[in-house]
Amino acid sequence: MLIKRKSIEAQANHKIGPGKKPFVAPVSKPPRKIRYAPVTLSEQDGVRFLHFGTEWVQGAMRLRKPDWLELEYAQQMMAWMLFIDNPEHVVQLGLGTGALTKFCYRTFVETRVTAVELNPSVITICETMFKMPPEDHRLRVLEMDADDFVNDPANLESVDAMQVDLYDATAKGPVLESAEFYQSCAACLRPDGIMTVNLFGDHPSFNRNLKAMRFVFDDVICLPEVHEGNVVVLAFRRRRQIDFAELDALAATVVARTKLPAKSWVNGIKQWVEK
């Protein structure tokens, strides 16, 4: 997760891309070079922030509310709750401070939650400084490459909701962003599964990622930009018929259950659909 810059409004990006194509096996790629940035912390006004040796924020936790989603973009990453009421399996690619992983684990008390993180120092800092609960029969934190996870045949059609937040210290866009990567993500989802992705609206990577997702998924929706740059994308493996009266009612249920601003998510979806 990265927050810093003022973005340029991304208009009409929902029209790019050649449309959904059948799933194909990803082509072989050379191994990615692993470069771990230093994991650093800062605190301000009762909030602890994670950094990778730069001023870029990789996650945050309010010290008095460690299980709350402090950042608005992280709240938007939960927008799949408008369409999936009781997931069996939620996957987080890119652990950050563990905010989304903790929230899903605490909110859905019967759901399996799997977090995938490549950098062992991030896992350690989440356990020691961000109150990550210990693993049990519902919670797994895997030290591995997200690309390896989504290409593991054991994970095919096993995930209801996948949350993708894969950034490093360079702030050059998501580390994994190809159509092949998103095909593998989609293949891990169940037929009605949903993926949410954190992007930069004013970065060249935005159009590339949106085009790649539109190539793979039946429907792609962008929520309004927050944090002066972050845009959360909802990607649906199978297109949903959106009934806004029903979504409004579901949003009220989400608000009552979690206090998340779900009504604003519905308004954001309306804005996208009506463009």
Image (spheres, rainbow, N blue to C red):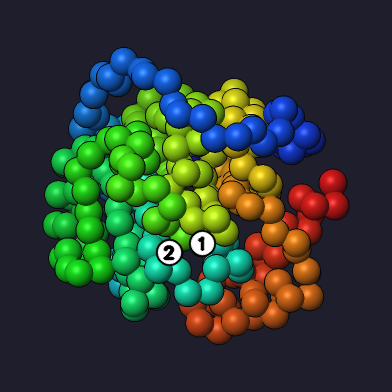
Q: Which residue is mark 2?
A: 69
Would you call the spot at circle 2 few (<14 residues within 10 Å), some (14-19), or many (20 or more)? Answer: many
Kindly tell me whether residue 38 is visible in this rendering.
Answer: yes
Q: Residue drawn 68% across and 47% down?
A: 219
Image location (x, y in percent) of residue 272 = 77, 50
Q: What residue type is disc 2 on?
A: Leu
In front of the other: 79 or 192: 192
In front of the other: 95 or 7: 95
Kindly tell me whether residue 206 is visible in this rendering.
Answer: no
Q: Residue drawn 14% across and 49% down?
A: 124
| The image quarter in which residue 35 lies | top left
Give how far apart the Cα atoms at labels 1 and 2 are.
10 Å
Q: Which mark's residue is nearer the viewer, 1 or 2?
A: 1
How many numbered markers are drawn? 2
Image location (x, y in percent) of residue 74 = 47, 56
Along the horizontal axis of the image, is 92 left or right of 126? right
| Dot 1 and dot 2 residues touching (CB under 8 Å) | yes
- 207 lies above or below 164: above
| The image quarter in which residue 112 lies | bottom left
Q: Residue drawn 22% across and 54% down?
A: 141
